Amino acid sequence: MSKSNSTSEPLFPSSYPEYVYNFAYGANLQPKVLSGRRKIQPIESIPGILEGWQLMFDLRGIPAVEPCFGNIKENPDAEIHGVLHKMTSKEFKHLLATEGGSGVRFTHLE
């Protein structure tokens, strides 16, 4: 997958298509987190590579519990391996609501 269009959107845009793909690169790779804790059952899950992005652990976490959280930043020389989960827009909104943390932002790529 390559980045062709990137825009920062509000956390809850006014509308989504019926289905969306979410690129998982951290805890949401684990079925016990995505379908267990978050109660999201992907319609389809396929391996993916996000070119031009780098995995970072630079988001402040919870001391003594989770010292930092994963994050991704643009880097033209990097790539991230993960999973594309196809889900309903309702499930995606639920995913956004359960991500938590301050400064959570999603970038829409086409």
Image (tube, grey):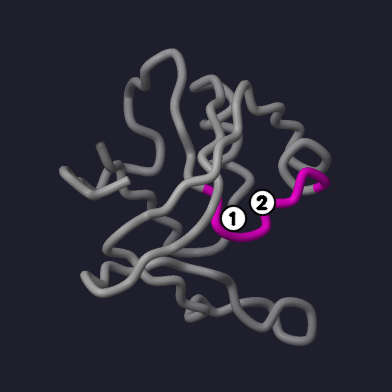
Residue designated by label 1: 100
Q: Quadrant of residue 43?
A: top right
Q: Quadrant of residue 88?
A: top right
Q: CA distance from mark 1 to mark 2?
A: 17 Å
> Does residue 14 lie above or below 12 as drawn?
above
> Does residue 90 lie above or below 29 as drawn?
above
Q: Amino acid at mark 2?
A: Leu
- The structure residue drawn at horizontal position 46% and vertical position 32%, both measured from the top left corner, is 21
- The structure residue drawn at horizontal position 44% and vertical position 63%, both measured from the top left corner, is 80
Residue 33 location, x and y as percent?
76, 48
Q: In the figure, is residue 48 to the left or right of 51?
A: right
Q: Which residues are magenta?
A: 24-32
User: Is residue 87 in the magenta section?
Assistant: no
* Front-lying residue, 92 or 41: 41
Q: Which mark is residue 29?
A: 2
- Closer to the eye: label 1 or 2: 2
Q: In the figure, is residue 80 to the left or right of 43?
A: left
User: Is residue 29 in the magenta section?
Assistant: yes
Q: Quadrant of residue 72?
A: bottom left
Answer with mark 1 or mark 2, whichever residue precedes in sequence.
Answer: 2
> Does residue 77 lie above or below 3 as drawn?
below
Residue 109 location, x and y as percent?
28, 42
Mark 2: few/some/many CA within 10 Å (<14, 14-19, 20+): some
Question: If the image is split into quadrants, where does the C terminus sit?
Answer: top left
Q: Amino acid at mark 1?
A: Gly
- The structure residue drawn at horizontal position 34% and vertical position 20%, both measured from the top left corner, is 15
